[in-house]
């Protein structure tokens, strides 16, 4: 059996590290062709020593120069490329069969889109590209024959709960609606984050470390803050609409603090299918890497006998207004999801940098959505232009907030 040649976009992040852990368990199935990162030199050097990829891309040029010198000193022949544009080039290499899209934020949009256009098997872990222009990714996959497989635990769970015929139609997109297959509703679960039971009046004093201390998952800081505001669930709603060709009103968000049920699908006969497992990203990664087969992920087995209860509740949209904003963006479409995403990225980073308070993140997103005009989709350029306008507005607003302190 031919090894899958793998390119990991964002190999030094949480998704990348977990992907390599799964790959490590199956050396006969997978070969690492390319790794990419921004500037994490030490970890990338370690990964190069273990995996000896053909290519490495460091989007930070200085880090690329330092890595080149370090690899030469160790006698390694990995070719080091520098700059964001090279991310879109390395996915096109003939030896690359599968691309793990794990770059956080809008920075992952162009290389992920390049992989889809090239007809690769694309494992989508970064939700922002699908949020910004999900329908475009699906349309491009139809044209190129690319296979799209979700890595977010929730979307992967939904995928696993679909009939095999719908899985095939989703992975290699064809025109379909879920109702054709007797599916009436998607139940998108979320833990509620670290502040589920915290009083709304206390959110102004939240620190970055508190926001990043998720009760169940080990994640990067950006997505951890998104979980704390529940914006991650809003982004996932938009993403699910694109991945599964469904409307926002067919998706309900359910707070499930234990993070054992990762999502559910309801059928017209009254059946609800759920995917359960320990909160470990290696499960969806292994599922997507091997689909339609199954392989060992190294994940601890779920012991149902040790579970005392599974809780479910409706989200508090007054406490977490991000959910209302995201549903608005999903219903409106056009460039509004990209505007929402840009405002949120600026807001989260500004909070992590100490420039704004935690409770100001979603206020900033709402202001950005109101101030920046949304237009119908008119090609990639329209999305990128909306993204830039929204970022500029949000950054200017953050600067104004700091001047008024």
Image: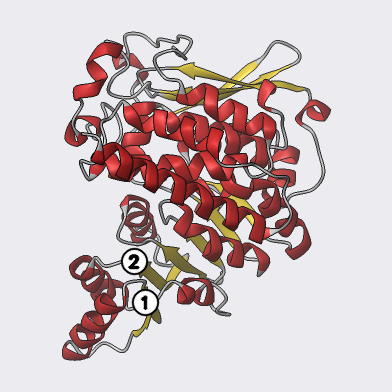
Task: Tell me the residue at 45%/34% (across/down).
Answer: 365
Residue 347 in the image: x percent, y percent? 36, 40
> 175 above or below 332?
below
Q: Measured along the vertical axis of the image, is residue 202 above or below residue 238?
A: above
Please tell me the numbered disc located at residue 37.
Answer: 2
Q: Above or below — where is 1 with respect to 65?
A: above
Between residue 118 and residue 32, name the one nearer to us: 118
**Closer to us: 170 or 28:** 170
Q: Which residue is mark 1?
A: 56
In percent of width and height, residue 224 lies at 31, 37
Left or right: 283 as drawn, with respect to 187: left
Give the residue at x 31% y 9%: 308
Q: Quadrant of residue 103?
A: bottom left
For the residues labelled 2 and 1, the Cα–Cα distance comes to 8 Å
Residue 55 falls left or right of residue 95: left
Other-residue count near label 2 (Cα within 10 Å), few / some / many at <14 / 14–19 / ≥20: many
Q: Are marks 2 and 1 in contact (CB under 8 Å)?
A: yes
Quadrant in which the N terminus is drawn: bottom right
**Where does residue 386 sit, x and y in percent of width and height?**
58, 51
> What colouring method underlies this structural image?
secondary structure
Marking on residue 250: none
Q: Secondary structure at mark 1?
A: strand
Of 85 and 27, which appears nearest the observer? 85
Q: Residue at x 25, y 78 (%)?
A: 62
Mark found first going from the N terminus, 2 or 1: 2
Q: Is residue 331 above or below residue 126?
A: above
- Whether residue 286 is visible to the viewer of this picture, yes or no, is no
Report if residue 148 is visible in the image.
Answer: yes
């Amino acid at each position: 059996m031919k090894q899958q040649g793998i390119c990991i976009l964002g190999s030094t992040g949480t998704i990348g590290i977990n992907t390599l852990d799964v790959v490590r368990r199956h050396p006969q199935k997978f070969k690492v062709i390319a790794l990419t990162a921004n500037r994490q030199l030490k970890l990338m050097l370690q990964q190069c020593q273990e995996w000896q990829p053909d290519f490495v891309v460091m989007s930070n040029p200085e880090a690329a120069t330092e890595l080149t010198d370090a690899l030469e000193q160790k006698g390694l022949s990995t070719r080091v490329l520098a700059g964001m544009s090279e991310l879109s080039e390395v996915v096109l290499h003939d030896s690359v069969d599968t691309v793990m899209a794990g770059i956080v934020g809008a920075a992952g949009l162009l290389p992920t889109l390049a992989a889809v256009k090239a007809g690769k098997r694309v494992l989508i872990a970064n939700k922002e590209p699908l949020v910004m222009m999900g329908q475009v990714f699906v349309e491009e996959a139809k044209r190129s024959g690319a296979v799209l497989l979700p890595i977010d635990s929730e979307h992967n769970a939904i995928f696993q709960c679909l009939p095999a015929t719908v899985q095939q139609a989703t992975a290699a997109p064809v025109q379909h609606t879920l109702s054709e297959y007797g599916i009436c509703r998607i139940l998108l679960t979320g833990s509620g984050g670290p502040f589920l039971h915290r009083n709304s009046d206390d959110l102004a004093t939240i620190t970055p470390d508190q926001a990043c201390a998720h009760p169940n998952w080990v994640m990067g800081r950006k997505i951890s803050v998104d979980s704390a505001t529940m914006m991650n669930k809003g982004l996932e709603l938009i993403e699910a609409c694109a991945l599964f060709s469904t409307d926002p009103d067919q998706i309900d968000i359910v707070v499930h603090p234990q993070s054992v049920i990762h999502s559910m699908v309801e059928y017209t006969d009254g059946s609800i299918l759920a995917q359960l497992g320990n909160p470990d990203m290696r499960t969806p990664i292994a599922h997507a890497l091997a689909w339609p087969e199954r392989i060992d992920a190294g994940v601890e087995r779920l012991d149902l006998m040790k579970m005392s209860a599974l809780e479910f509740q409706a989200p508090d949209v007054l406490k977490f207004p991000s959910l209302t904003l995201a549903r608005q963006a999903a219903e409106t479409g056009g460039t509004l999801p990209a505007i929402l995403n840009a405002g949120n990225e600026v807001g989260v980073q500004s909070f992590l940098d100490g420039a704004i308070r935690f409770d100001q993140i979603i206020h900033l997103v709402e202001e950005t959505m109101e101030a920046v005009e949304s237009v119908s989709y008119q090609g990639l350029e329209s999305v990128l232009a909306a993204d830039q306008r929204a970022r500029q507005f949000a950054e200017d607003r953050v600067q104004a907030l700091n001047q008024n302190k």
